[in-house]
Image (spheres, rainbow, N blue to C red):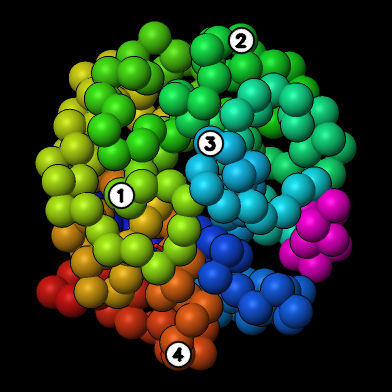
Amino acid sequence: MAISRDGRDLLIAPSILSADFLRLGEQVREAAEAGADLFHLDMMDGHFVPNLTFGPPVVEGLRKVTALPLEAHLMVLRPEIYLEELAAAGMHRVIVHAEATTHLHYVLGKIGSLGMKAGVALSPATPVGMVDDVLEMIDLVLVMTVNPGFGGQSFISHSFKKIGAMRELLDRNGASHVRLEVDGGIKAGNIARVADCGADTFVMGSAIFCKDPCQKVFREIYKSLSPGG
Ligand code: DX5
Ligand code: ZN
């Protein structure tokens, strides 16, 4: 269920990284029923980040469980080698890290030519201006609010300022079609402030899958985001 704040549609993207992988299908269905707008799939190769997760076969499985859009957050070196397989598995959007490829423009072009939407992710120390010259090729920028690699980390407080700077950059360039996504340490307790800085798409892993039932977490999220919440 999309919600609006200050005239902007806000989307919640549960990250399955914190789900129970033995009950993945069930948990994805629960999150979809509770209000997920899309699913965020964190793919890690043990090189770009010191962690390993899953690849295209898991995407194929998830495609059968939900009709909601799936986005891949590639925390891998040489992201270009996985793109054909991801397109075949039914990926809607692929997000690549600006730090993970020497040829960002080429990779984004390849994602588009395979019929997928393209996004660019920036790690905490990467400046917002990194996306300046590729805005026409993407429909999303992902401002990492933790260092990539693991779920359950604390939100880096400098990110409030960085999200605001990214919002300013997008508005200045007339790039209103580009969504501003945040990822890492987002919870019902800080989501309203993050939205006020200009973010409109919220990745949430541990907050959605680790503690309370999904329905309860989504109710808290909507309450925080409602006027006066
Ligand atoms: C971290 C991943 C995140 C992670 C977020 O590298 O990109 O998507 O799942 O987890 P939480 O919401 O627990 O910080
Ligand atoms: Zn992610």
Distance Cα–Cα, label 2 vs label 1: 26 Å
Q: Position of residue 181 (x, y in %)?
A: 39, 45
Name the residue that disc number 2 marks.
Answer: 106
Residue 143 lies in what quarter of the image? top left
Would residue 156 be seen by someone viewing this image from the given angle? yes
Q: Tell me which segment is drawn in magenta.
A: 57-66
Q: Is mark 4 within 8 Å of ligand 1?
A: no
Q: Nearer the viewer, mark 1 or mark 3?
A: 3
For label 2, the SS is helix
Q: Which residue is mark 4?
A: 212
Q: Which mark is residue 48?
A: 3
Q: In terms of image quadrants, where is residue 173? A: top left
Please indicate whether residue 102 sits to the left or right of residue 80 in the image.
left
Compared with residue 101, is residue 6 higher up or lower down, i.e. above or below? below
Q: Looking at numbered disc 2 in the image, what kind of residue is underneath it?
A: Tyr
Q: Earlier in the sequence, mark 2 or mark 3?
A: 3
Question: Which numbered disc, 2 or 1, marks the residue that appears first in the sequence?
Answer: 2
Q: Is residue 58 magenta?
A: yes
Q: Amino acid at mark 1?
A: Thr
What residue is pinned by disc 1? 145
Q: Is mark 1 within 8 Å of ligand 1?
A: yes
- Name the spot of residue 37 as percent of width and height, x first: 55, 60
Say if the magenta span includes residue 164: no
